[in-house]
């Protein structure tokens, strides 16, 4: 093996001073060369060419859906005043810097979750974005509907490297009993590709970073990137052929399983095809985060970056799973979120809940501020071009009600929605209609959606 | 699934009132509301087509879950990477298990992670490592150098008269090494200072030094051939000059010395590659060698013999990569990626003779091998199992039995403890325990670890032994270490995990184990309801239905003092809607009230009464009663069926479960007998297709 090629042809090392003299550590991979600088991950992430955006004159509208578990202390949430310049109750206080771009919507319901059996956390979470009643089973026959984010993602498919991004902070428990006979699939996933297929979320910030950006590698030459792309395509061609040969040999339900595989392969094909040309510079790879706050912050930054780079136009984010038991020790509260949410009017518990709720809204506020700091065309900011939704699977932790939901809607969706107002709907409005509006802002006509979505909600 | 009919056997716990409660409106599974009891089919001839009366069922295309994926690549490639657990999305559960075929969906994210994992594995296993090079820079002021003259001066070494400075290189292998030194001189007299650089007493380089200050110091380098082993490296000063009259003094200053190499290392040994690549691309030809590698590897990866053109199709990937400038290793890596990204790897493919017919067909040799290995090892078959499959031995009950007994003795059968019992009995949740630190300040990771060891060791005695499984509850002896002994109020055992008698302290069996009690508690309170539900659901397979509308207020119990809990629950049961289930569930939980959240003994009333009027006090008495209930052994069989086949039993499976249970009983209720009975049962050895009629009631499947 000719070692010199690993050192750019120089036959010997020439350290120039005593401080530079110690060799830079040379990894085994660098030694082997062959462009193995990026290991086991997609290579260079493609970014939607800026020209495409320029041609369309306007910035793309992105839809973001945030989920928090266990409801909200509504007495510290609902502003007294309506319209613009509304007052900010305690839990919403952190929104002050971006208040002019955040609306509070009061009087929103998700009727699909209103079923008179136990399991409101699972049902509320499962139907959070589907507005369909989930099937009561912890068996194999889970059934939900397609979620609003996926409807939009599929309508916009192919326009960005990732059709959608599903993020969260927690995978789930290690055993399989979740909520009152409902499958864990419902409590863990708000994004559903179709009625039977949840879109699992990523919960490790470093993995998300690698997936989005690992291809950003200035060490690799364009030729090496292209070559790798061709090799991956050869593999993919083989897999496609294998899958297609197998398909007709299968029965109905087996073929349905394999069809999920084909769907995934087609997305992988896009991913490979898009790999290789990018201009958006990622930040640093997140540290290994074990701390819940760090994970949350890292996930927020990744969302901002993915949206800024137009890697995707649809993001869902679950700050914990349905009926979460997380303890917020770092906020000085005692007890798991879920047990606290069954407050029974207890002042200590309600105080702890309010503190947790404040923290959750602070996270959203920091997300919005970061979006608002990014300039897009014609003096707009990234925040102006998103519609970011924030809500929970229930309203009150004791009552487990699915009406009077806590709802925030931030950004204007590129001028689609009026911003910064507190709007109170006289009669409970289906949240499905809000999702229809969000899709419409993103240029996607949804038609009737879920159990009770009839048309876009009136946001004016 | 409903509790099975058990003709002629006493049933202590079945609470008719509870079972009649049907959950509210929601979409419910037709199968779970079917309460019919099947009459045992008395026909002697086995039907050839599935009917409602006789249907061995079928299993949907079964994706490897995360554990299975990692175990499989471990056994296939020898890797210690765990890409699935590290990067794949979590698997969803059904019926409490994460390996239920119909429930394991595959998202686009999975495919991305599969591809990345496979490339990463290929790069690891086919990598040719270079020997770790020798790479050292010696600083005179800090490092061990041997001078024949001079002394350290600031950050350099001052050779003030003719002499040398020596360092030792321990060459890892023979090859070319670069020796180097950074020097300058204090110039004096007519000549420039002269230095040499050499090794083992030989001068390899001999040169004037022009530099006269630290800032202009020169680096001299020379390539030398060294054998493996220690060698000396010398920098020498050759032309000392000193004129005391003129005050002129010529010295050589050495800033540092260095050695690096070998620069021409040949590949070292990658044991993973050695095991997978038995040929040499140089001498055997790259394509032929790849063909040898994947002829074997793909067959193992897909867990069946290859079809004639399948190897060629894989090798076309290899050729494409190599023709496109890739190395032999690149070719292997991407061919492995194609192998692992294939649905034949990702899924356990079992083909039906006719996918649209209900005709019952025996599974092929290799499908049975995989069913056995994934049940017993959560991994792929080993060579011996492949051999047995190839030779048709798995088509007989005797052949299956031989393999089952062999496999249970293999260390890989530990997966039955971590995956099967880990999920069935919630043992995995011990890892996640987080009792309220205010209420339980003494709980710590050491205690948690001991809790886990206790219950896992206990399970091991069943998996590998011939122990009656009713002792899950009735055992009177157990193993404790000093930590648990203190936790249980026992004297420290003679040695860690010594077997001790636990009957005197209300323990022995699962329900006296701290880990089991703790995972069935709230962080700050015990919950008779949760514990009772665990006994009914996990041990008796008679899980009560979820509470009806508006009674989730049971959560109130989280706020009640232990002393008042019993009364509160009894009041709660005054509501007839709740009474049906809670009359059984709560009483079982009361029996365990003598143990707190972390499973330590406490003085709380632990009396209970079963629906038939039997009364008991405490965990010991309760466990002995439960151990006699035939529902326990039926339930164990049902749990293993669910995990082992990766599908939830349907009503049509009851007859087979009865048969399995009969053999289980005849064999003295030992775990190996149960596994043999299940592995030789009709649902395990057969499958059928599926009619196009989506409304068919046939098929407790999926």
Image (cartoon, coloured by chain):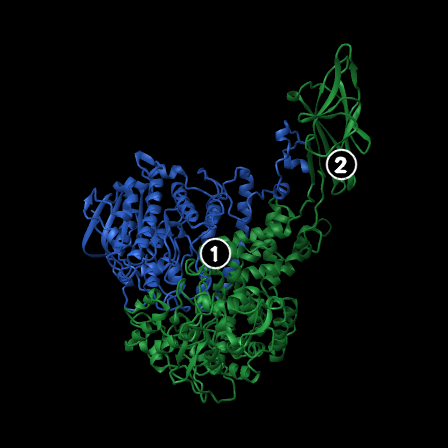
Indicate the position of residue A30 as horizontal and vertical percent values: 61, 41
Residue B254 lies left or right of residue B559; in this view the side is right
Instruction: Tell me the subunit letter for badge 1.
Output: B
The reply to whether callout 1 and callout 2 are in contact (CB within 8 Å) is no
Q: How many marks?
A: 2
Q: Nearer the viewer, mark 1 or mark 2?
A: 2
Indicate the position of residue B170 as horizontal and vertical percent values: 75, 40
* Chain that the image shows in blue: A
Indicate the position of residue B624 as horizontal and vertical percent values: 49, 80
Residue named by callout 1: B110
Residue B528 lies left or right of residue B352; in this view the side is left
* Chain that the image shows in green: B
Quadrant location of residue B224?
top right
Residue named by callout 2: B168
Indicate the position of residue B113 as horizontal and vertical percent values: 50, 53
Residue sitting farthest toward the top: B246
Residue B224 lies left or right of residue A341; in this view the side is right
């Amino acid at each position: 093996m000719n070692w010199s090629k690993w050192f750019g042809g120089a036959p010997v090392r020439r350290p120039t001073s005593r401080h530079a003299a110690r060799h830079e550590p040379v990894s085994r991979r660098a030694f082997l060369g062959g462009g193995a600088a990026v290991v086991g991950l997609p290579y260079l992430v493609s970014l939607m060419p800026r020209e495409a955006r320029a041609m369309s004159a306007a910035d793309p509208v992105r839809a973001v859906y945030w989920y928090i578990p266990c409801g909200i202390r509504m007495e510290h949430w609902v502003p007294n005043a309506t319209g613009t310049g509304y007052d900010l109750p305690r839990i919403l206080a952190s929104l002050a810097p971006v208040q002019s771009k955040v609306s509070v919507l009061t009087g929103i319901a998700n009727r699909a979750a209103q079923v008179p059996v136990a399991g409101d956390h699972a049902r509320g979470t499962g139907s959070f974005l589907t507005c369909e009643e989930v099937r009561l089973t912890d068996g194999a026959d889970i059934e939900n509907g397609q979620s609003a984010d996926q409807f939009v993602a599929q309508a916009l498919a192919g326009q960005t490297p990732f059709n959608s991004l599903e993020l969260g902070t927690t995978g789930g428990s290690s055993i399989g009993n979740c909520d009152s006979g409902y499958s864990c699939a419902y409590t863990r996933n708000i994004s559903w590709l179709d009625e039977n297929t949840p879109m699992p979320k990523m919960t490790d910030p470093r993995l998300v970073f690698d997936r989005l950006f690992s291809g950003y590698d200035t060490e690799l030459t364009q030729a090496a990137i292209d070559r790798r792309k061709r090799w991956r395509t050869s593999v993919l061609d083989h897999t496609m052929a294998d899958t297609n040969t197998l398909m007709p040999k299968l029965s109905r339900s087996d073929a349905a399983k394999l069809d999920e595989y084909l769907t995934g392969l087609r997305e992988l094909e896009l991913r490979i095809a898009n790999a290789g040309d990018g201009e958006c510079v990622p930040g640093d790879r997140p540290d290994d985060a074990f701390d819940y706050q760090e994970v949350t912050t890292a996930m927020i930054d990744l969302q901002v970056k993915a949206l800024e780079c137009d890697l995707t136009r649809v993001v869902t984010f679950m700050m914990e799973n349905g009926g979460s038991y997380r303890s917020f020790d770092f906020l000085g509260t005692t007890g798991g979120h879920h047990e606290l949410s069954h407050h029974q009017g207890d002042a200590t518990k309600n105080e702890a809940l309010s503190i947790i709720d404040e923290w959750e809204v602070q996270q959203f506020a920091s997300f919005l501020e970061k979006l608002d700091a990014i300039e897009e065309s014609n003096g707009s900011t990234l925040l102006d071009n998103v519609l970011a939704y924030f809500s929970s699977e229930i309203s009150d932790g004791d009552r487990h009600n699915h009406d009077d939901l806590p709802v925030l809607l931030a950004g204007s969706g590129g001028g689609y929605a009026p911003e910064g107002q507190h709007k109170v709907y006289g009669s409970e409005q289906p949240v499905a209609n809000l999702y229809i509006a969000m899709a419409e802002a993103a240029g996607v006509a949804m038609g009737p959606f879920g159990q009770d979505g009839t048309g876009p909600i009136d946001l004016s | 699934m409903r509790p099975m009919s058990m003709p002629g056997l006493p049933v202590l716990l079945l609470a008719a009132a509870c079972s009649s409660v049907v959950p509210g409106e929601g979409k419910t599974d037709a199968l779970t509301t079917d309460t019919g009891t099947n009459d045992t089919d008395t026909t002697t001839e086995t039907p050839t087509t599935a009917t409602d009366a006789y249907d061995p069922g079928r299993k949907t295309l079964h994706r490897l879950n995360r554990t299975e994926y990692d175990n499989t690549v471990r056994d296939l490639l020898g890797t210690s990477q765990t890409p699935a657990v590290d990067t794949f999305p979590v698997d969803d559960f059904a019926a409490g298990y994460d390996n239920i075929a119909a429930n394991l969906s595959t998202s686009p994210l999975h495919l991305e992670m599969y591809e990345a994992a496979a490339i990463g594995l290929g790069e690891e296993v086919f990598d040719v490592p270079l020997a770790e090079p020798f790479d050292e820079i010696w600083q005179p002021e800090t490092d061990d150098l041997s001078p024949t003259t001079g002394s350290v001066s600031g950050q350099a070494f001052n050779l003030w008269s003719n002499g040398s400075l020596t360092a030792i290189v321990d060459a890892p292998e023979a090859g070319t090494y670069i020796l180097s030194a950074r020097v300058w001189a204090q110039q004096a007299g007519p000549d420039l200072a002269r230095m040499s650089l050499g090794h083992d007493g030989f001068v390899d380089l001999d040169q004037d030094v022009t530099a006269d200050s630290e800032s202009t110091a020169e680096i001299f380098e020379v390539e030398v051939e060294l054998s493996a082993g220690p060698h000396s490296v010398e920098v020498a000063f050759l032309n000392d000059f000193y004129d005391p009259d003129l005050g002129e003094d010529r010295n050589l200053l050495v800033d540092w010395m260095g050695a690096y190499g070998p620069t021409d290392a040949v590949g070292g040994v990658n044991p993973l590659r050695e095991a997978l690549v038995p040929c040499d691309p140089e001498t055997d030809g790259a394509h032929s060698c790849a063909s040898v590698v994947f002829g074997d590897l793909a067959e193992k990866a897909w867990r069946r013999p290859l079809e004639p053109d399948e190897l060629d199709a894989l090798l076309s990937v290899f050729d494409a990569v190599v023709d496109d400038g890739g190395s032999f290793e690149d070719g292997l890596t991407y061919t492995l990626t194609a192998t692992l990204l294939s649905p034949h790897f990702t899924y356990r493919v079992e083909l039906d003779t006719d996918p649209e017919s209900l005709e019952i067909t025996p599974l092929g040799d290799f499908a049975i091998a995989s069913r056995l290995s994934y049940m017993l090892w959560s991994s792929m078959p080993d060579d011996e199992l492949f051999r047995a499959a190839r030779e048709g031995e798995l088509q007989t009950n005797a052949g299956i039995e031989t393999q089952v007994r062999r496999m249970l003795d293999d260390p890989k059968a530990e997966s039955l403890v971590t995956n099967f019992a880990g999920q069935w009995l919630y043992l995995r949740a011990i890892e996640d325990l987080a009792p309220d630190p205010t209420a339980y300040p003494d709980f710590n990771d050491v205690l948690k670890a001991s809790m886990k060891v206790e219950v896992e060791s206990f399970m091991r005695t069943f998996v590998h032994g011939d122990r009656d499984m009713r002792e899950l509850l009735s055992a009177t002896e157990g193993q404790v270490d000093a930590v648990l002994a203190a936790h249980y109020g026992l004297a420290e055992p003679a040695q860690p995990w010594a077997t001790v008698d636990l009957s005197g302290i209300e323990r022995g069996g699962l329900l006296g184990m701290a880990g089991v009690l703790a995972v069935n508690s709230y962080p700050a309170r015990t919950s008779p309801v949760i514990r009772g539900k665990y006994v009914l659901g996990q041990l008796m397979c008679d899980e009560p239905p979820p509470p009806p509308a508006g009674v989730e207020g049971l959560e109130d119990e989280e706020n009640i003092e232990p002393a008042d809990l019993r009364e509160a629950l009894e009041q709660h049961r005054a509501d007839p809607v709740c009474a049906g289930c809670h009359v059984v569930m709560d009483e079982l939980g009361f029996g365990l009230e003598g143990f707190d959240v972390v499973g330590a003994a406490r003085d709380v009333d632990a009396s209970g009464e079963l629906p038939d009027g039997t009364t008991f006090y405490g965990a010991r008495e309760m466990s002995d009663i439960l151990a006699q209930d035939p529902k326990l052994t039926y339930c164990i069989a049902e749990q293993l069926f669910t995990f082992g086949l990766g599908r939830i039993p349907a009503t049509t499976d009851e007859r087979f479960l009865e048969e399995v249970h009969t053999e289980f009983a005849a064999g003295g209720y030992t775990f190996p007998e149960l596994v043999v009975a299940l592995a030789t049962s009709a649902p395990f050895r057969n499958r059928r297709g599926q009619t196009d009629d989506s409304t068919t009631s046939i098929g407790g499947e999926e």
